Amino acid sequence: MKNAVSREIKSSIVIPANQRHIRKVAVLGSGVMGSRIACHFAHIGLEVLLLDIVPFDLSEEQKNNSKARNSIVDDALKSTVKSKPSPIYHHQFLDNITTGNFEDDLDKIAYCDWVIEVIIERLDIKKTLFDKVEKLRKPGSLITSNTSGIPISMLAKGRSEEFQRHFCGTHFFNPPRYLNLFEIIPHNTTDPEIIKFFEHYADLFLGKTPVLAKDTPAFIANRIGVFSMTTIFQLMNDFDLSIGEIDVITGTLTGKPKSATFRTADVVGLDTLIKVAKGVYDNCPKDERRSTFQIVDFVLSMEKNQWLGDKTGQGFYKKSKNEQGKRVFLELDPKTLEYKAIPKRPFDSILQAKAASGLKNKLRMLSKGNDEAARFNNTLNAMVFQYCAHRIPEISDELYRIDDGMKTGFGWEMGPFEMWDVIGVRETLDQMTSMGFEAPQWVHSMLASGATSFYKHQAGQRMYWDIPSTSYKAVPGQKHFILLANRKEDIVWNNSGTNLYDLGDGVLNLEFKTKMNSIGGEVLEGINHAINKAGDEGWKGLVLGNDASNFSAGANLAMILMLAVEQEYDELDLAIRQFQQTAMRVRHSPIPVVAGPHGMTLGGGCEITMHSDAALASAETYIGLVEVGAGVIPAGGGCKELALRASDYYHTNDPKIPRIVEAFTHIATAKVSSSAHEAFELGLLDKRKDEVVINAKRVIAEAKKKVLELHDNGYSQPPIRKDIEVMGRSGMAALLSGLSGFELGNYATPHDITIAQKIAYVLCGGDLSMPSKVSEQYLLDLEREAFLSLSGEVKTQQRMISILKTGKPLRN
C-alpha cells in the first residue's frame, strides 16, 4: 500500500524541463516515418526500441518464431536503411536500435523515457494502442504522437490526468534527418514544463527548429504549404502558364526548393497532398479561403488515373526517352491530360530576376515585372501573404513561427512574412487591396503605428512584430545561436569576399561571402588579415564560420582555369603558394583558429578545415577533397595533411600501407562524406581535436566556446612538423599496382590514371628509395608541382570547363 501511494504521488509531479533526461525512446510504428524517426534518435546516441505489429498471416510454426513475428519491423528498418539519401549519419548507430512487436515487447516501454506513436492515421487504432501504453509506461515518461491529421485533443480524450499532462503532439517532417521542423502541439492540459522541455530538447539534442503550433487541422507548415500548392492548382485556370514554367517561378528563383511545386507534389505523392487538403476543408468550416482546399478537376482526374507521382511512375511529370534514347521529363498538359515536352518561354521578368544578385533582389525584380510570369507570382504572393496574416492567432500567436515552419518544413529560404518584408509591406498591401485580397486589420494597424516591417534587427537581436502588444519583441532562443545576419553592426573589417565580426569575449569571426563561399584571393586576404589582427591586438582567437547553406565549395576554379589556359604558370604558382601559406597560418598561428564547417565543405574548404586547431562540424557536413573532378590534385595542404595523419597513426610493427591506401583512395575517388560522423572515418575530421554539433545553427556559437576553451587552457602555437613518415617507392608501388586493371575494365580513363599517379607520388613523398621522414613544406612543394603539371593538361582544362558550365565532372 505504501509503494502504491508513493507511486501515485510521484506520478503527480511533472519533472522540471531542466532536470529531465532522455536516454531511451520507444517508437511505436515502423513505417516510412517511424523507421526514419528511429534512425534519427539512434544517431544522436539514444537507445531506441522500435515496435510494430505481428504479421497476420503467420503459420502455426511461425507464430512461435521471433524472427517471423518481428518480420514487419525488421523488413521496414532494412528498407529504410537502404533508402537514399541515407536516414542515418553512419551505420554504426544502427546498433542503438532494438526491434520488436506490440504483442511480445510492448511492456519494454516501462524502461523508456519517451514513447512516440507513429502508426496509421486512424483514431480508433491509435486509441486502442494508447490504452495499452497507459497501463505499461513508467510514471513521468513522455508520450507523444507524430500524427499530422488527427487533433491532439481527441487523442488525449479519456486518458488519465497524469497521461494527459505528459502528452502532446511532436510532428517530424519527412525525411526527419534532413528537414529540421519539429512541431510541438500541446492540448489544453499538457503541462507547460513538457512544452518547455521539448523546445529545449529539439534544439539542443535533435538538431531541430522547434515550432509551437496550436491544435488546429494540419498544424502550421502543412496548413500553409498545402494552401500554397492548392492555390497554384487553381491559378492555372487564370494564367497561361505550363507546369514547368510555374515550377521555374516557384523554385529556386524565389527561394523555394529546386523541386518547386509540381515536382514536390510528385515526390510527396498526390494522394497524400489531397488527403491533407481534404482534412483542412472538412475541419475548417470558418476558413475564409476554405474553397481553395477543394481539389481542381484535372488533379482529381490524375487521382482517378492513379497518376500519383513517383510512387506510380507518373504524376505532374513523367520520365520518358526521346528518339536518341536519352531520358527526358515530360510534363502534364492540364487541359488535355497528355504528357508533352513543353518548352519554357523566356519571360523578361524571369530573365531579369535570374540576373539579379541574391534572393532579395530576385524577389524584388520579379515583383516589378508586368508579364504573365510576374503577374502570376504577384497574385500567388498576395494570396499567400493574406492567408498567413489571417491565420494569426488561429494557428499561431506569433508570426515568426509560421516563417520558421515554412523554412524548416518546406525548405523555403524565406518565410512568407520575411518575403513580404523584402518586397515591401506597404507597397504589397496596396497591390493586394487592388487585387481584392484584403489583409487583416492588425497589418494596417502595424503600418499606422509607424512600423514598416514585420522584422527588424536591434542590438544584435532579431525582433518580430508582436500583435497583442503592438510592439517589437525579440525572437526567443537567440541566446543559444550566433547568427551573423543579426550582427552587421559588429563588423570590424571587410573586403569584397569576407566580413570580420567581433563576437564578443575577445573572439573574432571571419565570414566568407563569395559565390558558393569559394576561396580566392579576397578570402585568403581576409584569413590572413584576421589572424594578423587577432595576434597583434590581443584577441583570444578566431572562428571561421558563416550562416550560408554551405561552408565553402572550394577554391576559385574560374581563376585557376583562366591562369592555366593563358599559361600564366608563374601567377598560378604564386596563387597556390598563397593558399598553402594561408592554410599553414591557420595551423601555425599565435591564436587558436576554429572552423565551423557545415553543408558542402569541399576542396579548399576542406583543406582550411583540416588545418584549423579544431573543427566544430555540423552533423550535416559533406566534406571531401574533390579536386580530381577538376583534373588536378589537392594542393592547399590536403594531400600533405592526409599523409601527416596517416603517419601519426603508424605504430612499430603495424602494417603502414593500408593507412596510406585509404588516403589515396579517398582523394583519387573524390570521396565526400555523407555526414560529419563519416568524415572521421575518412580521416578528413580528426577525433583528437574535432567535434560534431547536431544543430547547424549552433555551430558558430560552439566554435566560439572552443576558441575560449583553447585560449583559457594556455594555447601555444604548434610547431611546424618535420617528422612525417612517408613510404617512398615501395608505397607508390603498392598504391599503383591495381591501376592498370581499373583502366582495362573501363573504371578509369587514362587521365584518371595520370592524376592518380600524381596523388601517389605526393602521398608517398616522391621518388625516395626507402621510407623516410619529411617536413610539411616538403610535401607542400610536391603538391604544388603536381598541381601545376596537371593544370597544363588539355584534359584537365576540359574538366574544369565542364564543372564551371554544367556543375558536373567530365570523365575524359
Image (cartoon, rainbow, N blue to C red):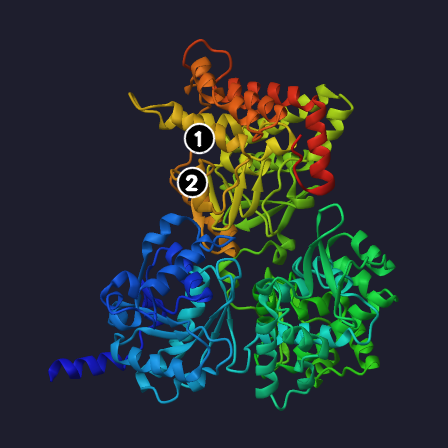
Q: Which residue is mark 2?
A: 680
The quadrant in which the N terminus is found is bottom left
Q: Position of residue 454 (x, y in %)?
A: 67, 72
Which callout, 1 or 2, points to the residue nearer the camera? 1
Task: Name the residue at 67% across, 41% down.
Answer: 808
Count of picture labels: 2
Task: Name the residue at 74% across, 70% down.
Answer: 337
User: Which class describes the residues within 10 Å of circle 2: few (<14), some (14-19), or many (20+)?
Assistant: some
Specify the amino acid type for callout 1.
Glu
Say which of 799 and 750 sits in front.
750
Assess whether mark 2 and mark 1 are in contact (beta carbons under 8 angstroms): no
Say which of 710 and 16 sits in front.
16
Q: Is residue 658 above or below residue 523?
A: above
Q: Position of residue 793 (x, y in %)?
A: 69, 22
Specify the amino acid type for callout 2.
Phe
Say which of 613 and 808 sits in front.
808
Q: Quadrant of residue 44?
A: bottom left
Q: Position of residue 123 (x, y in %)?
A: 43, 83
Secondary structure of the residue carrying tag 2 is helix
In the picture provided, is 111 more to the left or to the right than 28? left
Q: Quadrant of residue 532?
A: top right
Say which of 603 and 494 sits in front.
603
In the picture provided, is 38 more to the left or to the right than 654? right
Mark 1 and mark 2: span between their CA atoms?
13 Å
Q: Mark 1 vs mark 2: which is more N-terminal?
A: 1
Q: Which numbered marker is on residue 662?
A: 1
- Which residue is outermost to the top? 769
Q: Is residue 448 above or below residue 525?
A: below
Task: Name the residue at 52% across, 18% down.
Answer: 761
Residue 571 visible in the displayed image: yes
Residue 465 visible in the displayed image: no
Q: Quadrant of residue 98?
A: bottom left
